Each structure stands twice: as structure tokens, then as C-alpha cells.
Image: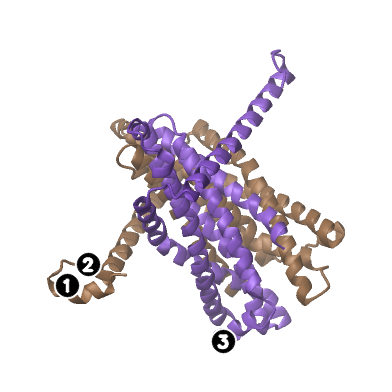
Chain colours: A purple, B brown
Amino acid sequence: MPAETSSGPSHALAGLAQRAGDWLGLIGGFGMLFVEIVRRTLRRDFDRSEFLRNLYRMGIKSLPIVIVTALFTGGIMVIQAAPIVQRYGAYGLLGWGAGFGTLREIAPLLTALMINGRVGANNTAELGTMAVTEQIDALRALAIDPVGFLVAPRFLAIVITLFLSTIFSDALALLGAAYAGLGFLGVEPAVFYRGLTTGLLGFGDVAHGLQKSIVFGIVIGLSSCHYGLSTQGGAPGVGRSVNATVVASAAGIFVLDYLLSFALS
Amino acid sequence: MTAPSERSTGALQPAGSGLLGSLGRLFLQQLETSRAVYGVFVLTLYYSLRGESNRPAFFRQMYEIGNRSLVFLSIVMGFIGMILVYQGGLQTQRVVPDLSLLGATFLQLLVRDLAASICALMLATRVGAGIAAEIGSMVVTEQVDALRMCATDPIDYLIRPRFLACLSMFGALVVVAASVAFLAGMWTAHTFFGINPRVFANVSMVRVGDLAIGLTKCLAYGAAIPVISGYCGLTTFGGSEGVGAATTRAVVNSSLAVIALNFVISGAGYLVFG
């Protein structure tokens, strides 16, 4: 955009153009990183043991927070549905009401947000520390490809972690919801589960949530790796890029959630 | 899991091995952290009531926490509003064809729970990570030690302005974000289901109890996020790796706190107001 003059409006315009340029650069960076990762993945040119190690650290070690989040989420969904259920006396529909929201939206979304906070932030912090202490340059100097050795295994581990965690938290959220229904409304878990399975909900609803979780995993993986690799400026720089990662992933998750809701229905 | 090894190792193993041991250790760690966070919270409250005011820092934090989160929160809440109305409308159509109460139900849900809780989760990522990264960098570069040398408590100097700013700005942010979500939902309802905006904007289902629950949540989240992230920042150790770890802990712990508080307040609110 032509903004050489230094008067007020054109100055603002230059700022805007700068912003837009930054955004385009960011999206381009994500895209190029994604292409690189996909190429390595298809050629199986990534570090297998690093992949398994990350899968353990990201997947197994996140289980406690996934469990806690899912159980509470199920309970919250039932408490929110409770006044409506009581007004219409539709106790048989409680399973459907809580189940559809949980399976299609809330469980994938909240699991993604928690994994974003734990795994995504951690990943950026690690890669950022490596970038700041010049370990990544050292890898390059040893002719080891940082994308194949560091980035691709982490990216794949994040996507798989989020997918599996979402399955797990779907089940646990329904468990939490069933027992919250028993505690707050006196609805037997059997009635709750019957409401889930009588035909208003199908496998399509579960698949809808799981497809979303794959896309969320890609967003978290790309943004955490990208921000981690482009970290500059010591310890404060690491803090800044972790902050930028979680914000970018969270915004990306919500925007893509909206677009996917249309694309998948 | 490590259950089989527990049997084979027997009583000679030091305490804390095996599944039960690791569970107990996790629990004790959590208990210890909660006690420390509670201590920070009490000290922050004490300084907020007794300490001399530090207006410039307070206003700077209000700008940092409030104004600079506005765009991010508005984008997220706008999309949330569109998603919820679209999905809710589709599902409701399967059971009842009449969608005229969609707006009223959506508004009630927004006031009771979603506006405050989703905003809090987003603020936990944005502001929580920011506070922990900032204070953590100060700890690592020994600026906090310098503060202590000057006989200034970092809780008073660093956490108190953030606490007060977050507490006062969070309510305002929630109101703006809820309006954005509601307007986005109204637009979605009009475009996809042909619901007249006048029909959609129906406040008849929002009762005093819903408002009370929503406001209680605002206060609780607004207090919890800065205290927990500030604590995570202050307990940073190690170099840049430590700052990253502290930021991660801040996001995870404040998000978990938001979800747990949501469960407690929603449950109590349901039992009190019905």
C-alpha cells in the first residue's frame, strides 16, 4: 500500500498495512511449515523415537487434566440444562440435551483449550528455549533437519494426542453428566443413557466432534511449532511467544469451529 | 499404569512408588499448591485493603488486561454466539419445530454461564499467560529479588495492581463480550432460521437468580485468574525454560480453576435459585 507521506491518516494506513502484512506473513509461515511437515510425514522422514517420546509426554501426562475437565464439563452441562428439563418435565430428554451439546461442541472445544494450554504452551516453551539458546542452529550445523527431527514428531504427537483425548473426554463427560443428573435432578443414569441412545443422537454427532478435534490439533500443532521456532530475545522472548501461541491457537480454534460447523453439517 | 509393579516391589520400596504412591504424591502436591495460592490470595486481599494505592500501575494494568483483550474476546465470543445458535437451532428443530424461544433460552444461558465462563477461559489464556510470562521473566532476571531488597513485597507491587485491574475490568469485558455474542447469535438466527430479531431479543427468561449467578462467576473468575497466574510467575525458577514452564502452569491451573469454580457456583446457584 502506498503510504510514504507522514501525515495523520496515511500514517494510520501505513500501520494498518503493516498489520495486514504481519498477518499475511504469519499465515504464510503456518502454510509453509505445514507443507514441510506433511512432506516429511509422507516420506516417513521423521524421528520415530522422538515421536513416541512426545506422544507419551503429551498424551499420557495430560490425562489428569483431561479427566478433571471432562468430568466437570459433563456436570456443568447437566446443571445448565436442569431448569429447562424441570420446566417441561422431560427427564427422558436429559441425555439427549446434555449429550448433543457435549459430543458435538463442548467436549472437543474444552479438551482443545486445555490441551492448548498444557501441550501447546509447553511445546512452544521448549522449542523457544532451543531457539534462544541456539540449539536449533547447532542442529542445522550438524546437518540434522530440525523439521524432521523436532517439529514433525511434535506436530504429529499433538494431533494424535488431541484426537485420542477427545474420545476419552467424550466418554468421561457423559459419565460426569449422568451422575450430575442423578445428584441434581434424581434422574437415574440408566434413563440418562437411554436418552442418549434412542435415536436422536447418532454416530454422526460423535464423528462431528472428532473431525473437529483433528482440525483443532492441526491448529495447535502448527501455531505452537511456528511461534516456538521464531522465538527471539532470551527468557522474556520465550514468555512472549508462549503467550502469543495460546492466544493465536484459541482464536484459531473458535474461528475454525464456526467454519467447520457449516462444512460438516 | 504401574499397578503390577506395586505388588512385586513390596514394602522395601521407599514411599511414593507405584500407582497409589504417585496418586498420593499428586494429591499432596496439589494440596501444597492450593495452600500456597490461598496464601497469595489472602496477602493480595490484605494489601488491597491496607496498602497505599499505586494508581499508575493500576491504570496501566487495566489497559493491559481490559482494553487489549477486547478485540480477542469479541472475536471469540462472536463466533461462539454464531456456533451455539446455529447448532442449537438445528438440534431443537429435530424435536420441536417452534424456534421462537431460541433467543430467550440463549440469552438465559449466556447470562447464567457462557458469557462469564468462556470469557474467563479466554482471559486465562491471554492474561494469565501474560502475567506469568511477565513476572516469570522478572524473577529469572532477578528483578523480583531486587524488589525484595528494597523491602517491597512483590505481591504488593506486582500482583495487587493486576488483581484489582482484573477484578474491575472483567465484569466490563463480560458485558461487552456477551452483547457481541448475542448480536452474532441474533444475526445467525435471522439468516438461517428466519427468526425476527425482535422475537429473538427476548429477556423474559432471565431472572434475578441468573443475573446473580453470572455476576458471582465474574467476581470469582476475575479474582482467581490474576492470583493463580501471579503465583505461577513468582515461583518460576531456571532460565528461559523456567519461564515457559511457568506460563504453561499458569494457563493450565487458571483454566482448571475456572472450570472447577464454574461447577461449584453453578451447582450452588441451581440449589439456591432453582
Q: Earlier in the sequence, mark 1 or mark 2?
A: 1
Q: Amino acid at mark 3?
A: Ala
Element carrying mark 1: helix
The residue lying at 37 percent from left, 56 percent from top is A52
Q: Position of residue A148 (x, y in %)?
A: 42, 43
What is the C-alpha distance between the residues marked 1 and 3?
A: 41 Å
Mark number, residue B17: 2
Residue contact between numbered discs 1 and 2, judged by CB atoms under 8 Å? yes
Q: Nearer the viewer, mark 1 or mark 2?
A: 1
The answer to whether residue A187 is above or below residue A228 is: below
Mark number, residue B9: 1
Q: Position of residue B209 (x, y in %)?
A: 66, 67
Chain of the residue on which disc 2 is drawn: B
How many residues crowd around disc 3 within 10 Å: few (fewer than 14), some, or many (20 or more)? Answer: few
Q: Amino acid at mark 2?
A: Ser
What is the C-alpha distance between the residues marked 3 and 2?
A: 38 Å
Front residue of A189 and B170: A189
Residue that badge 3 annotates: A190
Residue A97 sits in quarter: bottom right
